[in-house]
Amino acid sequence: EQTLLPEQLEEVTNYMSTNFIAIHNLVPNCPLGIPVSVPALGFRGSQPHIYDLVRTLVISLAYSHSPRNLHIGVVTDRPQQWDWLKWLPSAINITSPDHDTHFYWGSMREACRDLGNMQDYLNRANSHMVVVVDLPDHAVYVPDDITRGVVEHEGLRIMNSTTFLVAGATDDKKITQPSHRIHVSDTGDVSVPGGINMAHADNTSIEVADNVARALSRFRPEGFGTTPSGDGDEVEVS
């Protein structure tokens, strides 16, 4: 015999309870987290909205994590679109001799080679790399001749201690799992496997990203270089 809840025993109470749950089971404008512990996230759909969303993710990550714990880079053949990253302390190549270069690469081969060589540092510092990939005319994958730092994960060759955010590519199926592919519509609605139009993408323009990155450029741990212009006061953070 089915046991009824108290509110189901009375018609008006049952209606009010059901109506309340239907109205309030979703919280509007509540931020949704996107995991960066996965090897790669692939974005597809409206390219302008994708770039807005990925810039938002990068700015949020840079603001929320110390450059000691999270490094940010980009693989692109359109460097002018990502020039603003140079202001982020997280983008400084801390493994370079003078700490005066940034994590910029022109191809996946270059990026994976350097990421492989960084494995000892990343493990020692307990750090993680987040790398934006913007190669709209190329397939994205870890080249077969790159072995250092490469691990097999659910049938894919991926880089250890690294998450790729694939914002532009002709094909990313060799580096992303189906469950880690995000579709952004022309209206900015976000869909994932199992959830259609489940959220609306935040958007950050290049101008806004540049302004925020410049503001963050002053806050850097010791040894993380100076601002790209070389002027202004740097504030050391732990």
Image (cartoon, rainbow, N blue to C red):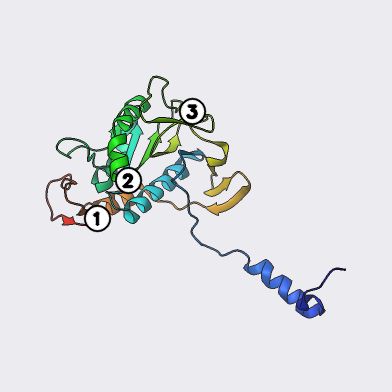
Label located before the other in sequence (1 or 2): 2
Circle 1 Cα neighbour tier, 10 Å, few/some/many (<14 / 14–19 / ≥20) = few
Q: Is there CB contact under 8 Å for labels 1 and 2?
A: no
Q: Quadrant of the N terminus?
A: bottom right
Nearer to us: label 2 or label 3: 2
- Percent from the top left, x then y, of residue 16? 73, 76
User: Distance between the Cα atoms at labels 1 and 3?
Assistant: 34 Å
Q: In this rendered view, identify the residue nearer to me: 166 or 156.
A: 156
User: Distance between the Cα atoms at labels 1 and 2?
Assistant: 26 Å
The three-letter amino acid code for the residue at tag 3 is Thr
Residue 142 position (above or below residue 5) = above
Q: Which residue is mark 2?
A: 126
Q: Secondary structure at mark 1?
A: helix
Label located before the other in sequence (2 or 3): 2
Q: Residue at 51% across / 62% down in the picture?
A: 29
Q: Which mark is residue 170?
A: 3
Nearer to us: label 1 or label 2: 2
The three-letter amino acid code for the residue at tag 2 is Asn
Asked whether residue 16 appears in the rendered view, the answer is yes
Circle 3 Cα neighbour tier, 10 Å, few/some/many (<14 / 14–19 / ≥20) = few
Q: Which residue is mark 1?
A: 215
Q: Secondary structure at mark 2?
A: loop
Q: Residue furthest right?
A: 1
- 48 relative position to 235: left or right: right
Q: Secondary structure at mark 3?
A: loop
Q: Residue at 77% across / 78% down in the picture?
A: 6
